[in-house]
Amino acid sequence: MPGTPPIKKKEVLNSLKDLLSKDMDPHSGRLWSYVYETGVSELRELAEESYILSLWRNMLDPTVFPSVLELEKSVVSFVAGLFGAPDTTVGNFTSGGTESNFMAVLAAREWFYAKNGRSGVPKLIAPATVHPSVIKSAWLLGVKPVLTPVDSEYKANVDELVSNVDDSTALVVLSSPNYPFGTFDPVRDVAEFLEKKNVWLHVDSCLGFAIPFARMNGRDIPLQGLNIERVDSMSVDLHKLGYAPRGSSTILYRDRDRRKNAFFVYSKWPGYPIVNQILLSSRTSGPLAASWSLIKALGVEGYKTLTRYAFDAREKLIGAMVKQGFRVEGNPPYIVLAFSHGELDLVDFSRKAGEKHWHVQVQPGSKKMGYPMTVHFTVTPVHISLVNGFARDLDEIVSETRKLSELGKDPMLEALKTVSPSEVSTAAPLIMQLLGGSGGGLEGADLSFISRYIYELDPDVVEALFREVSNALL
């Protein structure tokens, strides 16, 4: 092409690689959260090549890129079939669980408005363990979230939940499973109560893709979604336990009537007509192509095998952690686990694990809300070859971890306990100093104290503090 500007391809890519070199290797299997890895390089290569092949295609208009429509129908059909959804089921491929849950809240709100008019503020009822994307969706859509208590296994307390359902309730959202503890809300019990209520029931199963395969392997895990007649919609991610690249999820509806009012359709301008079945408009079909290819390559039998590896690793992990005095919170039957410890400082435990190149996510919990501090593990197939090494490292990690009894008073924490949410802006600069990152960013910053602060402080103060600090950092 005449006049092409000089492209410093090698220089730019080397600069990018330098930045990426500061990250943990997402394929190493040494991360127990954030990354969902099979450990099978051929599958990763297939996903990457499929992604690249479809990278520049735009899902906005399937009349220009008809492959998009066929790929989406195929992926949605596969997921729906896994969960025993009825033949009337329809759905869409989305960018992730947040968008899938957003579409469910939107569809439920519009369903509610169509039947009740647009006066008043519709409510969303959910247990307190519901994913924050649901609360975020309610905030964006002008729906009032009402969170209800959970039982000793962190499942929805059915009596508490249904007692909040009234004529202003647009939807109920349940998790199957929830992220913090991997436990399953009793969807069937709630569905039975809602049988004669005009209230939408959504099941967030974004972590649930492996459930059907675990059941096929003989695991006693509840299948909860559109197989239950009263459920109106469900969300299922492929970029978690379907092992597709990020940007891969599905939202499923019981039928077309429930979906259609969530469409955004617009023709009152001089350009092309807009028909959006999800929130995003222009988007690459790379994640869709990668998801389709993995489904075709693995099929049910392949996913059954990968799921078996993950569960075998789960058993070994639980054994190793319990041996070190950890407690599995909530008695989950799945490969999503949270461990507490009565004596160890889990913030320091995570840091010591990091020194041995393991990433272990701390879940701060909340003293005020009655949730313990835990460490989170999502077990994936790659861990079957690494869990024994982790178990060996645990001896040294635990022996070096500070005891809770050794924690002294933190003057900053004690001061923040007296601060109200409206006063947080005055404390934010001090938090920035504690972070101590270089160049105004997070590189080199000591973030370990944050989890302890989150546990100890009022959640409203925590949220206000995070808003101030994030606004200053990013």
Image: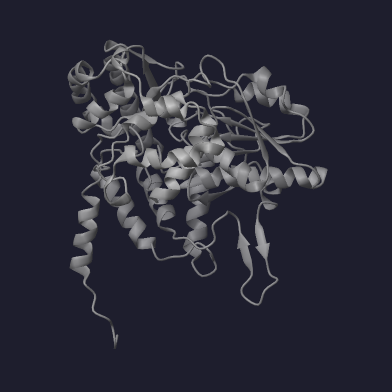
Q: Residue at x 35, y 46 (%)?
A: 297
Looking at the image, residue 349 lies above or below residue 282: above
Residue 364 visible? The answer is no
Give the farthest residue toward the bottom.
2
The reply, left or right, for residue 348 in relation to residue 103 is left
* Location of residue 25 in the rendering, given as x and y in whole percent from the top left corner: 24, 43
Looking at the image, residue 474 lies above or below residue 459: below
Q: Residue at x 54, y 57 (%)?
A: 280
How has the structure been colored for display? one colour
The reply, left or right, for residue 376 in relation to residue 10 is right
Looking at the image, residue 27 lies above or below residue 15: above
* Location of residue 224 in the rendering, given as x and y in whole percent from the top left corner: 56, 29
* Location of residue 67 in the rendering, given as x and y in whole percent from the top left corner: 47, 62
Question: Which of the two residues, 230 or 366, is positioned nearer the viewer here?
Answer: 366
Looking at the image, residue 395 lies above or below residue 101: above
Query: Disc count in the image?
Result: 0
Q: Residue at x 31, y 19 (%)?
A: 345
Q: Quadrant of the N terminus?
A: bottom left
Question: Which of the two residues, 106 or 259, is positioned nearer the viewer here?
Answer: 106
Q: Residue at x 27, y 30 (%)?
A: 383
* Location of residue 305 in the rendering, given as x and y in whole percent from the top left corner: 33, 32
The reply, left or right, for residue 365 in relation to residue 156 is left
Residue 444 visible? The answer is yes
